[in-house]
Image (cartoon, grey):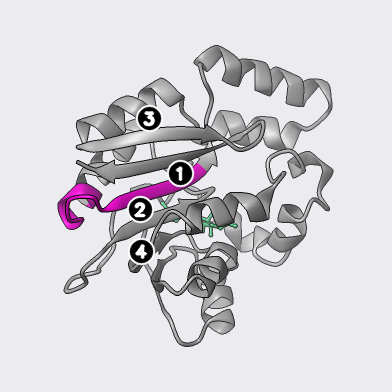
Amino acid sequence: MGREFVEIFDEWAHSYDASVSGEDPEYRDVFEGYETILSEVAKRVSGTVIEFGTGTGNLTAQLIEAGNSVIGIEPNTKMRQVTADRFPSINIMDGDLLQFNVANENIDAFVSSYVFHHLTDEEKGEALKIYAQLLPASGKVVFADTAFITDGAKKNQVIKERNRGFHNVADDLEREYYTTIPILTKLFDDAGFQVSFLKMNDFVWLMDATKK
Ligand SMILES: C[S@@+](CC[C@H](N)C(=O)[O-])C[C@H]1O[C@@H](n2cnc3c(N)ncnc32)[C@H](O)[C@@H]1O
């Protein structure tokens, strides 16, 4: 469930940090303002924070730096090892956006960057309902991820990427479950969150949700 793209990160684990720093021209626009995007997520939460899809630990670093108590949930073994090696003192567990074991924790927030699109829209709704059950009133979900204003905007982005020869990005947009802001608004609302969105670059939106 939601783990169909996990193996892709076996290959990407060693070169991921080069991609986010703009070395891969295909992904330069996706990761434009990457560190700012991560800091916008980190500054919106505090306390005990569950981070999904830690990857190489870049958001984890900002969350720890801000004084949070972080528990990482990462389904890819190689990525999990990278984060665990980088932050030996924190708990990085096998798990995913839908299945994770944080029993006995008083959770203040769920966060992620570049991860939520691994779930179908139906699974996204399911996941948000799980988070709502685990959070107190005013608890937060803050995700940064690629999304589009409309389905048409997404199709136009795919055409733009193909026209400039960026077929990896175009294939990625067509393969994974990148959704729209109206759909996300409804999913957060149905799960009992008040949500606002902030556009961070041509791809990424910040989703800042508070449990009602
Ligand atoms: C594009 S990377 C993002 C890494 C990091 N959050 C960042 O911002 O640089 C996506 C990460 O999500 C993980 N992932 C893939 N499917 C997932 C799922 N269903 N639940 C949680 N994490 C998932 C991948 O293994 C990978 O580490």
Q: CA distance from mark 2 to mark 3?
A: 16 Å
| Residue hosting label 4 | 50
| Residue hosting label 2 | 97
For the residue marked with disc 1, what is the amino acid? His
The percent coordinates of residue 123 (x first, y second) are 31, 39
| Residue hosting label 3 | 184
Q: Which residues are magenta?
A: 131-144
Q: Is residue 137 magenta?
A: yes
Whether tag 4 and tag 2 are in contact, CB under 8 A, the answer is no
Whether tag 1 and tag 2 are in contact, CB under 8 A, the answer is yes
The percent coordinates of residue 200 (x first, y second) are 61, 38
Disc 3 secondary structure class: helix
Question: At 28% from the left edge and 61% from the top edge, which residue is drawn?
Answer: 108
Q: Does residue 174 lie above or below 95 as drawn?
A: above
Disc 2 secondary structure class: loop
Question: At 58% from the left edge and 28% from the top edge, which residue is drawn?
Answer: 174
